[in-house]
Image (cartoon, helix red, strand yellow):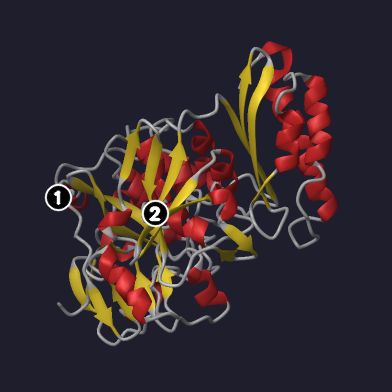
Amino acid sequence: MAEPQITVNGQPRPLAGVPAHTNALDFVRGLGLTGAKEGCAEGECGACAVLVARPDGDGSRWAPVNACLVPALALDGQEVVTAEGLGGPDDLHPVQTGLAEAGGSQCGYCTPGFVCSMAAEYYRPDRTPGPDGFDVHAIGGNLCRCTGYRPIRDAACALGSPSPADPLAGRQDRPAPPPAPTRVDGFARPADLAEALALLAEHPDATVLAGSTDWGVEANLRGRRAAYVVAVDRLPELRDLTTGADGVEIGAALTLSEVEAALGDDVPLLAQVWPQFASRLIRNGATIGGNVATASPIGDLAPALLALDARLVLASAAGDREVALAGFFTGYRETVLRPAELVRAVRVPTPLAAHTTFRKIAKRRFDDISSVAVAVALDVVDGTVARARIGLGGVAATPVRALATEAALEGRPWDLDTVEAASAVLAGEGTPIDDQRASAAYRSAMLGNALKAWWDQAWQGGGSA
């Protein structure tokens, strides 16, 4: 097994002796590449953004990620580009030039992160030059506290196309580096699922690591340290997405950005979730299996998957077993996962419900943690609710199904009277609490408003969602 190393700005950098908890941000700053900064240490501000070469068909793409969350060892064998690798004072990158000319930087603390996120969008193959071609959500995970966003947006929307001689654009024509099997003190990246399960059996206290968007926060802000880390984010058995007659099976190690791109609008409820789920930086790291397995009661994805009647495929040395997501969560951050078992795939059955909505209540419209999340999937036949599934987040110790509300809907005419009666039931679902994001009373009120708001916006006057 080769000695671990990362290629940073085209130069191999050894990882020998790097502790398992050292994140990629501290690693590159230790190399003297201090453009990337630590602002929040939890993936919210984007000051730490760097580019990583990721697989994209037969080629690769530059994906921005939060370096403060990713362990350096998790990037063994990978290619990373920092703001310094994009350009320097004597040879600015077009993104850097655009920001300078538009006045898009004042103190400069956030600028290198913006540069990396903007560069990823700059190199997007199907981007068209001009204000309508740049997806401003590409920089939605980057915060600036002094410049103001107008000049940054102006710089982004004025970008042209990469030069044919641009080496980073040309790099995308070649495959991304394959995952490198890694085995050092306290950290392992197994080559396949069988090896991963064997390592978990050998190290019962191991932490299973995928995108590290949850564990990275624990390590940074709470000083948590794992006795042993098993990285599963690149296991080939966990990275397939297949569509069959019975539904869609999504590999647990696919990032949310990869699932979003692969599914498109095929699962409309999930298509509503993605733009509201954190930021592109986070979705480039977070995996669908990791998001479910962390069992957070305030995650956005679980309510939608509950409304979709999703099931999980759990893998162990004894083989696979399948459980309904509704029975997966057993308590706060607790699940039915057994020792040496992990989530292999998420299954969404078909046919899908004809009418769906996802409503997230948060203090900010984007890049925020939800106070309440409500996902609804309905089948309405001849004006009557034939089937209802409602998933809730933020109102109990776990994500939950609104079973009483579902019962209040099914078999009833889909009209305003039913909506109002079911809304009264929905307001009483869960066990909401007072915390820094919202009061229990507010959460209950938002539950009670969810169905009525959907009715008013999508169904009033004979419309359909």
**Splitting the image into 4 quarters, where does residue 246 fall?**
top left
SS for dot 2: loop
Q: In the rendered image of this protein, does residue 127 appear above or below residue 212?
A: above
* Residue in view at x 31 percent, y 52 percent: 239
Q: Earlier in the sequence, mark 2 or mark 1?
A: 1
| Number of the label disc, if any, that sits on residue 174 | 1
**Splitting the image into 4 quarters, where does residue 418 fall?**
top right
Q: In the rendered image of this protein, does residue 383 appear above or below residue 266?
A: above
Q: Position of residue 223 (x, y in %)?
A: 54, 82
**Splitting the image into 4 quarters, where does residue 67 fall?**
bottom left
Q: Position of residue 362 (x, y in %)?
A: 68, 49
Q: Position of residue 35 (x, y in %)?
A: 39, 68
Q: Nearer the viewer, residue 224 or 88?
A: 224
| Screen quadrant of the C terminus | top right
* Residue in view at x 22 percent, y 77 percent: 4
SS for dot 1: loop
Residue where numbered disc 2 is placed: 252
The answer to whether residue 179 shows anywhere in this view is yes
Which of label 2 and label 1 is nearer to you? 2
Q: Residues within 10 Å of mark 1 (few under 14, many from 20)?
A: some
| Screen quadrant of the N terminus | bottom left
Q: Amino acid at mark 2?
A: Ala
* Residue in view at x 40 percent, y 79 percent: 22
Residue farthest toward the front in the current orientation of the protein: 318
Q: Position of residue 187 (x, y in %)?
A: 33, 79
| Apparent side of residue 438 relative to residue 81 in the rendered image (left or right) | right
The answer to whether residue 281 shows anywhere in this view is no
